[in-house]
């Protein structure tokens, strides 16, 4: 056995251990969501009972609807603003200071951003509710959308924009008929990533939500339920959320890869 073969096997084993560490607990949680027993320590048979109970709970359904509203509207706004921001930034001279300001919401701890947003809303005397959660999610989602779209713009040929303008097309027509179709995979990748982040986000929503069920999102509902112990319903709900998140992230990565390779 050669030294390179040994090294390859060691790296493969190391990669397997890392994947087991990362995804082992998730696999266990997903398996327990199909456990007929209410106790997580004993397997008594396969059942989808707990998934049915989720759709019988008006509190969970209301929280899921709030989450979809927040994620959908914030994604739409963040995608629009983030795409326009990316177009504007890419036309300017490269600046590390500007990049740092743009990417700050991505690296600032969620708790710090949540407290800052809460203080800002309090200063302006804004009533908290779903609208404040939506605005808060837009703040950090813009940076992610901008970063993804800028990746596509790195490979964008601006000569086709100049050709469109030379042929008499207006700036808006050029954007709608030339620029947007070319960068659309990157825009969709950013939108899917923004939706995923907003769908899963808890800390900022917890700080900027108003009182009552009308502004409770699904992660907040899970938090309120888990304080009394992990139940099979929570496992089922977490499994659904993870499957949705994994699917959206994979779609985002695939679209982003297509955008980069052209």
Image: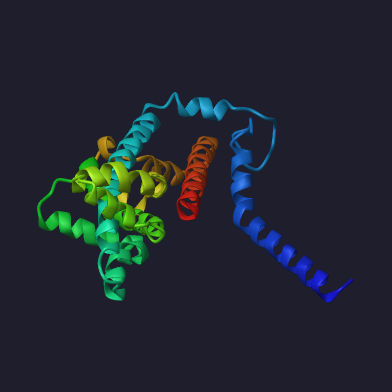
Looking at the image, which residue is at 51% across and 37% down?
Answer: 240
Residue 41 x %, y %: 65, 43
| Residue toward you, 13 or 222 | 13
- Would residue 205 be found to the left or right of residue 233 on screen? left
Can the viewer see residue 97?
A: yes
Q: How many marks?
A: 0
Kindly give the residue lying farthest to the front in the view shown: 167
Looking at the image, which residue is at 63% across and 27% down?
Answer: 47
Residue 148 x %, y %: 39, 55
Looking at the image, which residue is at 68% across and 62% down?
Answer: 15
Residue 164 x %, y %: 27, 48
Quarter assignment of residue 213: top left
Can the viewer see residue 209?
A: no
| Residue toward you, 177 or 6 | 177
Tell me how the rendering is colored: rainbow
Q: In which quarter of the image is the N terminus?
A: bottom right
Quarter assignment of residue 127: top left
Kindly give the residue lying farthest to the right in the view shown: 1
- Would residue 102 be found to the left or right of residue 241 on screen? left
Above or below for 10 versus 227: below
| Residue toward you, 209 or 79 | 79
Quarter assignment of residue 235: top right
Residue 219 x %, y %: 40, 44
């Amino acid at each position: 056995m050669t030294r390179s073969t040994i090294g390859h096997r060691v790296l493969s084993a190391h990669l397997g251990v890392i994947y087991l560490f990362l995804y082992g607990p998730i696999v266990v949680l997903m398996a327990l969501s199909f456990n007929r027993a209410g106790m997580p320590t004993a397997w008594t048979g396969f059942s989808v009972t707990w998934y049915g109970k989720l759709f019988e709970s008006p509190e969970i359904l209301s929280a899921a609807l709030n989450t979809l509203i927040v994620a959908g509207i914030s994604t739409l706004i963040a995608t629009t603003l983030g795409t326009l921001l990316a177009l504007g930034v890419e036309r300017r001279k490269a600046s590390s200071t500007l990049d740092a300001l743009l990417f700050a919401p991505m690296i600032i701890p969620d708790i710090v951003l949540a407290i800052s947003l809460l203080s800002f809303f309090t200063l302006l005397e804004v009533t908290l509710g779903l609208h404040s959660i939506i605005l808060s999610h837009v703040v950090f989602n813009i940076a992610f959308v901008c970063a993804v779209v800028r990746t596509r713009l790195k490979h964008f040929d601006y000569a086709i924009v100049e050709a469109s303008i030379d042929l008499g097309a207006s700036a808006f027509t050029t954007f709608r008929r030339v620029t947007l179709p070319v960068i659309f995979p990157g825009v969709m990748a950013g939108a899917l990533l923004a939706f995923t982040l907003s769908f899963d986000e808890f800390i900022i929503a917890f700080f900027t939500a108003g009182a009552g069920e009308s502004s409770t999102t699904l992660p907040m509902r899970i938090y309120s339920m888990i304080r009394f112990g992990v139940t099979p319903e929570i496992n089922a709900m977490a499994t659904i959320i993870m499957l949705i998140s994994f699917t959206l992230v994979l779609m985002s990565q695939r679209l982003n890869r297509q955008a980069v390779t052209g």
